[in-house]
Image (cartoon, helix red, strand yellow):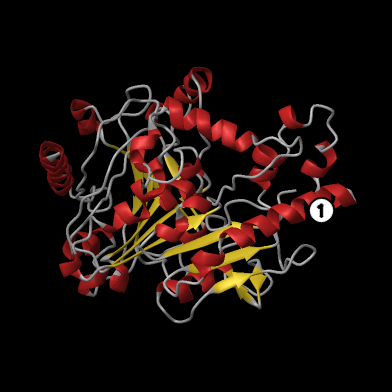
Amino acid sequence: MASIWKTMKEERQSAAAQSRLAGSSRDREMPAVIIMITRPWPSLLLVLAVVLALVVSSAAAAADELGGEAAGGPRRRRAASVMVPITILKSAIAEGAVCMDGTPPAYHLDPGSGAGKNNWIVNLEGGAWCNNARTCRLTKGSGRGSSDHMEKEIAFTGIMSSPVANPDFYNWNRVKIRYCDGGSFAGDTYKKALLTGCSSGGLAVILHCDDFRTFFPPSQGTTVKCLADAGFYLDAVDVSGGRSLRSYFGDIVAMQGIARNLPPACTARLDPTSCFFPQNIIDGIKTPIFLLNAAYDFIQIVLSLAPNRAEPTGAWKACKSNHSACNESQMKFLQDFRNQMVASVKGFSGSKKNGLFINSCFAHCQSELQGTWNNAAGGSPAIQNKGIAKSVGDWYFGRAEVKAIDCPYPCGKNCHNII
């Protein structure tokens, strides 16, 4: 691990020196500190088993990147969304920390400024899972398994955006870790840190929130919290009476050897597959965590409740395409799913340190979309007239306790429904 830290530091220093010689501060790479753990390539699922890189910079470097703002110089204009270039960690190959196809891991960084220059959002990219050799082979040939196929730049939106729609976090260092294999964090000095992710990245946040906290020594006094968006996958019965998602997760846990990385407090009393479901581990998470989820999560409807193999006649096809086409019995089934979700967070919501926002939308991943992460009137889905961005900000900064659960559908103010 120390050797990776050393090679990464040397690589960044060399790049910065070359940039200075070229007379360009705009293109200079920021210093990075990274520790990686090599694991078998099938461990695609756990995003903290992705390349978890924590990119850090000094106040002087951040000020230089932003045109001298911290020193009183002009401030870089931040648009509502920012196109951020990719950084490929070529030095990681020598240590065996690589993507599924052997290419080096990658991240995107938009450096912080002003009061946010020592604060960090680390966002874990989602992207579903591979649960067998065939699906893993397919993934290996895409941007989810190879940095060769990743976009050269991506838009930072939602909680990663700047600044009107994101007043609480827009000037933080924001880094998105691309989803392709495995790793772990290490760092220097931080005031605030927030681990985020949606979908499979949201599940990874839940699984590794306490692990993330251990990388910040208590002596630093860092405020460390986690935000899991659309990661609250339920162990639910499907329309055929089976448990499609449990079967799917069971394959993933077995194929990727995940059992050894699950919370010991859970595996001491339940089987490994059960401990991959958030409902069985959230009460044991010690680090403050905020759960953001749609009560009628679109992906869970399609993947867990009514997958094609569970309803071969296609009786749910119209309902899965448009929630207004659901008949009475189908809507009752979805309401039962919503009730199971609410019941599963009862103990979790009793802790003052935790936050909760469950709206009655047919949606998925609401923290990373500009339309759902904003404070504009009539924009974000709202519960008791408070939107998602305001709710997360109030919770993180201790401005208010947030335990928001919307009433059942047809409640759902300002929903951005996928179906």
Report the number of numbered marks.
1
Tell me the amino acid under the disc marked 1.
Answer: Lys
- Of residue 357 and residue 234, the one placed in the foreground of this image is 234
Q: Residue at x 36, y 25 (%)?
A: 41
Looking at the image, is 399 positioned above or below residue 84? below
Specify the quadrant of the image occupied by residue 254. top left
**Residue 209 placement (x, y as % from top left):** 37, 55
Q: Residue at x 25, y 48 (%)?
A: 185
Query: Outermost residue, bottom direction?
Result: 399
- Of residue 142 and residue 220, the one placed in the foreground of this image is 220
Specify the quadrant of the image occupied by residue 183. top left
Q: Which residue is mark 1?
A: 332
Q: Secondary structure at mark 1?
A: helix
Looking at the image, is 21 positioned above or below residue 292? above
Query: Outermost residue, front direction?
Result: 269
**Residue 15 placement (x, y as % from top left):** 17, 42
* Residue 216 as seen in the image, left or right of residue 281: left
- Quarter holding the N terminus? top left
**How busy is the neighbourhood of tag 1: few (under 14 within 10 Å), some, or many (20 plus)?**
few
Specify the quadrant of the image occupied by residue 339. bottom right
On the question of residue 163 being in view, the answer is: yes
